[in-house]
Amino acid sequence: MSGKTPFELMMEQAQEMAKAFNPALSSFDPKGFEKLWPTMPKDFMEMSFGKGVSKEGLDAKTRLLLTLAGLTMQGAQADTQVRMTVRHALEAGATHDEIAETIAQMSMFAGIPAMTRAMELAREVMEDNKDEDS
């Protein structure tokens, strides 16, 4: 057995099929695609997901940290979603420590491998963000 999850096998098959249809996709990088997706400004996030709906509700930063916790609980298998949630959480005012603490808290429920994977993905985003800020 290959040791790959059914999802990983399905993604490999999809990538092979995409390459057959368009050879240019052989060098496709999901991270490059993520960079094309703009980060929503905090005010827009608040209007769409936070205080605009309920003035007494959760703010965008809290909602995004909860989303990050949920993605970690699912095993941090959705790389793009984890990275984009971290990016948006930073934009909404979350600190690196708050992001790390949110992920670390999930180790008690999701396990160390899920926490480690989510932390690796978050660290990538935070390092990229640091380079862009320089």
Image (cartoon, rainbow, N blue to C red):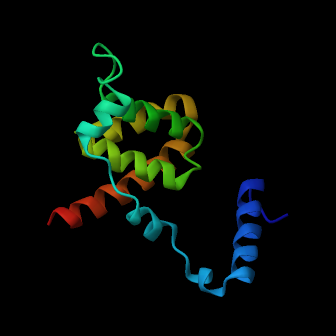
Kindly give the residue lying farthest to the left in the view shown: 134
Quadrant of the rendered image containing residue 100: top left
In percent of width and height, residue 63 lies at 38, 29
The answer to whether any part of residue 121 appears in the image is: yes
The answer to whether any part of residue 94 appears in the image is: no
Q: Is residue 100 above or below residue 128?
A: above
Q: Residue at x 73, y 55 (%)?
A: 7
Closer to us: 43 or 104: 43
Q: Is residue 134 above or below residue 125?
A: below
Q: Residue at x 70, y 75 (%)?
A: 18
Q: Is residue 39 left or right of residue 104?
A: left
Closer to us: 113 or 18: 18
Q: Quadrant of the C terminus?
A: bottom left
Kindly give the residue lying farthest to the top in the view shown: 56
Closer to us: 23 or 117: 23
Q: Quadrant of the N terminus?
A: bottom right
Quadrant of the rendered image containing residue 26: bottom right
In percent of width and height, residue 13 lies at 77, 69
Q: Is residue 32 above or below residue 105?
A: below
Q: Is residue 39 left or right of residue 103?
A: left
In percent of width and height, residue 52 lies at 30, 24
Q: Residue at x 56, y 46 (%)?
A: 113
Q: Residue at x 74, y 76 (%)?
A: 16
